[in-house]
Amino acid sequence: MKRKGRHSIILTLCIVLIVYIPTFSSDTLIGGGGSTPTQKPFENVLISRIGKGCINDMAYTPDGKRLVVATSIGICVYDVINFQLIRILNIHKKPVICTAFSPDGSTFISVDKKGIIHFWDTDTLKHKHTLHTDAYVKSAVYSPDGGTLAVSHGGKQHIHFWDVETGIKKNVLTTVDGRNSTVHSLAYRQDGKILASAHYDKTIYLWNTVTRELEHSLKGHEDDFEMRSIVFSQDGRTLISGSQDGSIRLWDTDIGAQKHVLTENLPRVESLSLSPDGSLLAIGCIDGTTQIWNINIGKLWKTLKGHNGGIPAISFSPDMRTIASSSWDGSIRIWDVASGQQIYMFTEHYGEFRSIAISTDGKILATISSGTYTICYWNTTSGILQKTTRMPLSEEFYPIKYLTFHPEGKALATAHYDDSIRFWNIDSGKELITLEKVDRNPITAIAFNPDGKTFAGACGEDNTIRLWDGDTGVLKEILTGHTDWIRSVAFSPDSSLLASCSQDRTVRLWDADTGKQLRVLKGHRLAVLNAAFSPNGKTLATVDNTRTIHLWDTDTGRQKRVLSGYRSSYLCIDFSPDGKHLAAGNTGGVVDIIDVRSGAIRQKCTGHWDRVRQVAFISDGKMLVSQSEDSIVKLWSIKQ
């Protein structure tokens, strides 16, 4: 009885300790120079995810029943007989760059941005093993005997050869000594004796895989355009190359000379696929069309139309009855080769989201993806797509890179890759105004003044900011002072100030009416990326890709505080409507909700696979939107 009593006392003491001892995060969160531990941040609830990831590559399984798609969130496997998503293989922690099947078709690989290669069983989709290359991969191909993987890495001039079974690096081929010529794509000749490598210097090199000696250098594509894809003919005697210069060139691999040019009049070429029998060549173009050419006679056979964006990946089915094309418009389309008719369309694979914008009332989210001509409008409460506005596909219109709402919510401004800026009526989709074009002066940031009277556009070439009348589009002022590219611009809530962030490591405050420079804020060690005004306009928060957040007094231009001690570097920032918190998107794919007074992280929005590039609180601050380089936009519920 005495022993039982002692046990009861010990148990009671344990319960008391568990109840009354406060629990802290295992990590000490330091904010604003403080060092007091805080409770573990609250994990916010994801309301909606927009997109299934940007498509980088795809291929049919050997039996033609499935389509394996490499995306920014993993490998998506589609049933192309019953037209349904089978599974998303998301073991990767970074976007998947490419995929390839072993010659016997029993295995396929998925290669991510960090150089990790996973091997999968084609039939069961079970993971087999992993190969760590420890560098960003641009291209990976199986040797014809299936025993070797040839891998090229971004920013490097080497091709690495790995043993598929052991995972051991066999050897390294240094492609071009002393020259900056990254390998963009690789292709083995069918006999395995020749490896072709396409480089950023617009040259194709043919290598003897036994001696590792250079056999031939093939030159002919224009210098100012990337070479996107190369493929060998069935007999291996011809190499086909496609470039953004709009040409398809055929090369004699025996003598290393150009045989002939199939065409030089295409829109920018993004991808190639040769039919299994070698007779047809599918060409994916920037304008959203897929052209099918008869290689034997050198004639265009069919043009497949329907996409509204470039075609980064394309693949013939093994039986040649269908062809799959992916586009930056978010779709994968399955086409009947004989008739040229679309059979089915998989959706929601939007390309890399280039820009997002929130309407003033917080009800609508507008998005644009890289290389597309379509603006999507989403309901922020449900995440449901409400409408799309398609820009004209013509030489006069270039893809959109930035967009922003007019404060009244009836118009939208877009900045394009041809340096033009256009205003659009949201309801009708009609163009309202085209601002005076700034030739050869890339637009790097845009913003409307909250009162709608002024529109600001930052120009990258001359480091200026142009102010236009928000109603008429008439140029009002040109602001000079920065000495390097301007990364972002933001107006104060009362419309009186304009803040600009630059790679010259300064933030400048301007009078929004007169364009007069008021103050230069100095203190950043790196290029300043983003800024946000507090709701009362008295404080400006800025970030510079370090683990700090700078807070400035907008009246005096003096630095109030530097919030520091965070675990990841911040790229973007926004104030909550009550001014008490900051939402900061970091390089690790997380949005931190930070208490402005203490600098402590109070909440976290986790789940992105790559760097967060844009964050914005919605209306009353109960919701947050984040956009990441994983090509996903997420809507979050924020704890009040």
Image (tube, helix red, strand yellow):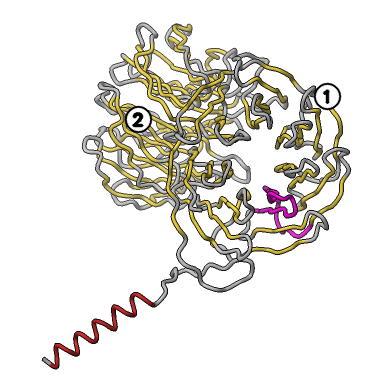
Q: In this orientation, which residue lies closer to the viewer: 207 or 36?
A: 36
Q: Give residue 8's quadrant in the image.
A: bottom left
Range of magenta residues: 522-544
Tell me what residue is drawn at x 42 percent, y 36 percent: 71
Query: Disc number at residue 176?
Result: none
Q: Report which residue position mark 2 lands on.
A: 191
Q: Whole-percent x and y of residue 389?
A: 56, 20
Tell me what residue is drawn at x 33 percent, y 76 percent: 18
Q: Are marks 1 and 2 in contact (CB under 8 Å)?
A: no
Tell me what residue is drawn at x 50 percent, y 57 percent: 603
Three-letter amino acid code at the position of disc 1? Val
Left or right: residue 191 versus residue 491 is left
Q: As displayed, is residue 5 above or below residue 54?
A: below
Q: Whole-percent x and y of residue 52?
A: 42, 34
Local secondary structure at mark 1: loop
Q: In this orientation, which residue lies closer to the viewer: 432 or 638?
A: 638
Q: Whole-percent x and y of residue 293?
A: 45, 11
Q: Report which residue position mark 1 lands on.
A: 474
Q: As displayed, is residue 520 above or below residue 83?
A: below
Which of disc 2 and disc 1 is earlier in sequence? 2
Give the total of numbered labels: 2
Q: Is residue 49 magenta?
A: no
Residue farthest to the bottom? 2
